[in-house]
Amino acid sequence: MSRRGERVRRPRVAAGFTLMEVLLATSLLAAALALAFGILRAAGATVARGEAMAERNERIRAVSAFLRERIGGADGLVFGFDAGSGRSLRFAGDAQAMRFVSDVPAYFDRGGPRLHELQVRAGPARRLDVAFRQLRAGQALPATRSPEPLVTGLVEVRFAYRTLAADGRPGPWQDTWDTPDALPPQVRVRIRDGQGPWPDLVVALVRAGGAGR
């Protein structure tokens, strides 16, 4: 029995969280998780965009380098004759196709001069095809393999040509090259894909002045 006048000590009960405190903590945790997930998703999207941009830039560089080397190396060799006029064909081109002779690398079919045929193929997604044909006695032989896509998934591809005036200044761009027995001094290639236009590619044909001589 307790003595009279002494206060009976009761054991303390640990204080718990109230329902409002639990709900507040849960809300804060959910907000933190949502913020972290949003940051991770944004970081992943940024990485994906960076990779897509790098891949597109690499494709632009590779295609532009191929076209610059092949078109710029056109040598003006005859690959056929016009049936109506009998004029020799050294360069044929319009807004959607080009034909000219240029050397191919040694690793490709033993190298040497080949007729290059660049053709824009229309469809849901345009593409630029390239084909090579051997030459014999100023005539292009039948193709031994099908055209290969150089680049796909395009919105627009256009070729243009221009010559130089008597004073050496460049003339206006034309959609068709009207002098097939000579090389155009300059060729322009415009390409646009789903992400926008590529930088204009303007190629100077170094042998334009001596072709046909």
Image (cartoon, rainbow, N blue to C red):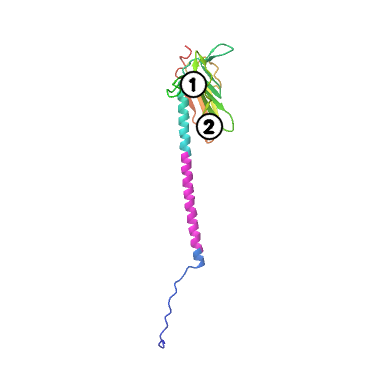
**Chief SS of the magenta region:** helix
Residue assigned mark 2: 152
Residue 147: % across, % down: 53, 25
Up-down: is 165 above or below 66?
above
Q: Which residues are magenta?
A: 23-51
Position in image of residue 196 (x %, y %): 52, 34
Q: Is residue 172 visible?
A: no
Q: Residue at x 51, y 63 (%)?
A: 23
Instruction: Please name the amino acid that badge 2 sits on.
Output: Thr
On screen, residue 127 versus residue 109, left or right, reads right
Residue 167 image offset from top left, x and y in percent: 48, 16
Tell me if residue 13 comes above or below residue 30 in the rendering.
below
Helix, strand, or loop for circle 1? strand
Q: Nearer the viewer, residue 66 or 171?
A: 66
Identity of the amino acid at label 1?
A: Gln
Which residue carries the number 1 mark? Answer: 186
Tell me if residue 167 comes above or below residue 47 in the rendering.
Answer: above
Describe the element under mark 2 as helix, strand or loop: strand
Query: Around disc 1, counting alpha carbons within 10 Å, would you say few (fewer than 14), some (14 to 19), or many (20 or more)?
Result: many
